[in-house]
Image (cartoon, rainbow, N blue to C red):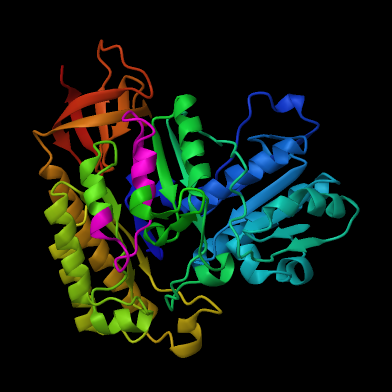
């Protein structure tokens, strides 16, 4: 058992699969770069910003790291296992580097911010270390590293850093894309490193967000996901029009780009998502009926230790409000097993909230202490690993049942599906997601559909992770 379990349908959206970019015209560039991203959607979005910066400096993306002049790992510090994976990968790249003098290796993102010069001095695995707010300085850092110096910039910014950069869409299916609407986080959850690695919240200019969404739609994209550590706290003042743009207003503005452009968002904090957001979702058909609403724990006592600033009752009321305003809304969650001092009753409280919330899917972890967090300074990580694993297994098993029951209820229903590509198992089948973010697989048949088209699909069967259907004419 590992310390994270997630529905495989959603793995590619949130968890650390290696990720390589691609450029059809890579040979037109003087140098080549290769990048892998680990962790959250924000990291994948940041990698697209990095690709844009590097492209303007004459670097083309390649899938083959052995031919790259520059190898970058965009890292995550949310879990110990993620950091271990990166260290192992860096060791592999060092062997390649020894056989290819001149190749540079860099670490980007949260792990770079947290460990800073340790990579350069103690482990000697990398040439460049760049924090999440310092990607604009990459050209200078690369230039320094090419002279044999070690380069580092992990300074955090108080301003939105990349609003004017048009991301290069990496490994894109040409249908779905991420748009970062804010950076950083003001929620000091005791288990989380994000406020320390990504800094304080700052919201991006709403006009630049709308322009990016419009540009994506004009280029054929049919779905955008608005990203932030806590999107519901988005807030920007449009001084020219004397308007305060909340997340609900931003959501509406993006939805109005075109009714053919689907809009998703992630992630919401239970204390911040408002009725205004929910009513906006209900008003526009192209805003997807899906909310990722992290629980972390179902115990009020543990939630207080986590500094989540809501209670068990508050969370249940929020889920009920979502169901009231958007009855068919899909809801997913994050859950941590075995947080400091967690007792069996606390664990049972978590299972109870899972049951009442009836999550469609969840990302499930057991707690791993992260150095520098409030929890690491205040509390002892006192739950034995075997108990953490046992509780996590019970959470995973329950979520499996909930996912099965959720999909079972969809049999006989018809959904509007955005076709994303061929199914993994067969080129004779399409795959796509419905508004509730569930994957649906269906035969291509003789229908004249293409990637990026919408199709109405009636669900005939299901697995724990996937709906199976037929096109409805």
The question of residue 261 being in magenta is answered with: yes
What residue is shown at x 24% (from left), y 36% (from top)? 285
The x and y percentages for residue 332 are 27, 55
Q: Relative to 344, is 119 on the left or the right?
A: right
Vertical order, 77 against 176 (above or below): below
The magenta span reads 250-276
Q: Quadrant of the C terminus?
A: top left
Residue 453 x %, y %: 33, 22
> Which residue does the image show at 25% across and 23% down from the upper left?
455
Residue drawn at x 47%, y 28% as measured from the top left: 174
Rendering coords of residue 309 (x, y %)? 33, 77
165 and 297: which is toward the camera: 165
From the viewer's perspective, is residue 466 above or below residue 183?
A: above
Magenta stretch: residue 271 in it?
yes
Image check: 439 left or right of 201? left
Compare residues 235 and 52 and report the one nearer the observer: 235
Q: Is residue 400 visible?
A: yes
Q: Is residue 55 above or below residue 81?
A: above
Quarter of the image with the N terminus is: bottom left
Residue ID at (46%, 40%): 210
Left or right relative to 231: residue 286: left
**Image location (x, y in percent) of residue 168:** 60, 36
Q: Total marks drawn?
A: 0
Q: Furthest residue to the right? A: 147
Q: Quadrant of residue 446?
A: top left
Residue 331 can be seen, yes or no: no
């Amino acid at each position: 058992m590992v310390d994270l379990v997630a529905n495989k349908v959603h793995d590619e959206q949130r968890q650390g699969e290696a990720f390589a970019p691609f450029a059809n015209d890579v040979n037109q560039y003087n140098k080549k770069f290769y990048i892998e991203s680990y962790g959250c959607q924000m990291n994948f979005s940041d990698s697209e910003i990095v690709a844009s910066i590097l492209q303007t400096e004459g670097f083309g993306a390649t899938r083959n790291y052995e031919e790259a002049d520059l190898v970058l790992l965009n890292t995550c510090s949310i879990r110990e296992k993620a950091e271990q994976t990166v260290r192992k990968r860096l060791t592999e790249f060092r062997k390649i580097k020894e056989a290819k003098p001149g190749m540079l290796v860099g670490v980007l993102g949260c792990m770079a911010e947290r460990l800073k010069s340790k990579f350069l001095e103690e482990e000697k695995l990398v040439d460049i270390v760049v924090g999440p707010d310092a990607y604009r300085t990459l050209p200078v850092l690369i230039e320094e590293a090419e002279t044999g110096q070690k380069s580092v910039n992990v300074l955090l910014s108080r301003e939105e850093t990349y609003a004017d950069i048009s991301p290069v869409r990496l490994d894109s299916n040409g249908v779905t894309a991420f748009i970062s609407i804010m950076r950083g986080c003001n929620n000091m959850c005791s288990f989380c490193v994000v406020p320390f690695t990504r800094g304080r919240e700052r919201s991006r200019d709403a006009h630049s967000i709308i322009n990016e969404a419009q540009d994506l739609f004009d280029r054929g994209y049919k779905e955008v996901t608005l990203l932030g550590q806590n999107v519901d706290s988005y807030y920007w003042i449009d001084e020219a029009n004397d308007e305060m743009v909340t997340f609900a207003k931003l959501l509406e503005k993006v939805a109005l780009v075109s009714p053919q452009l689907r809009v998703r968002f992630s992630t919401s904090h239970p204390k911040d998502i408002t009725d205004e957001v929910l009513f906006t979702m209900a008003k526009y058909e192209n805003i997807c009926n899906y909310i990722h609403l992290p629980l972390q724990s179902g115990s009020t006592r543990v939630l207080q230790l986590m500094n989540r600033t809501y209670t068990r009752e508050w969370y249940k009321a929020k889920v009920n409000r979502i169901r009231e305003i958007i009855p068919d809304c899909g809801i997913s969650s994050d859950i941590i097993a075995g947080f400091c001092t967690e007792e069996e009753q606390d664990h049972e409280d978590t299972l109870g909230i899972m049951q009442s919330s009836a999550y469609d899917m969840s990302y499930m972890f057991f707690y791993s202490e992260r150095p520098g967090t409030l929890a690491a300074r205040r509390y002892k990580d006192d739950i034995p690993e075997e108990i953490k694993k046992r509780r996590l297994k019970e959470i995973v098993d329950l979520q499996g049942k909930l996912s099965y029951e959720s999909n079972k209820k969809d049999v006989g229903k018809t959904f509007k599906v955005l076709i994303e590509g061929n199914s993994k198992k067969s080129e004779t089948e399409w795959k796509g997601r419905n508004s509730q973010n569930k994957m649906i697989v269906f035969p291509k048949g003789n229908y004249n559909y293409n990637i990026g088209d919408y199709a109405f699909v009636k669900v005939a069967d299901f697995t724990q992770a996937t709906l199976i259907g037929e096109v409805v004419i």
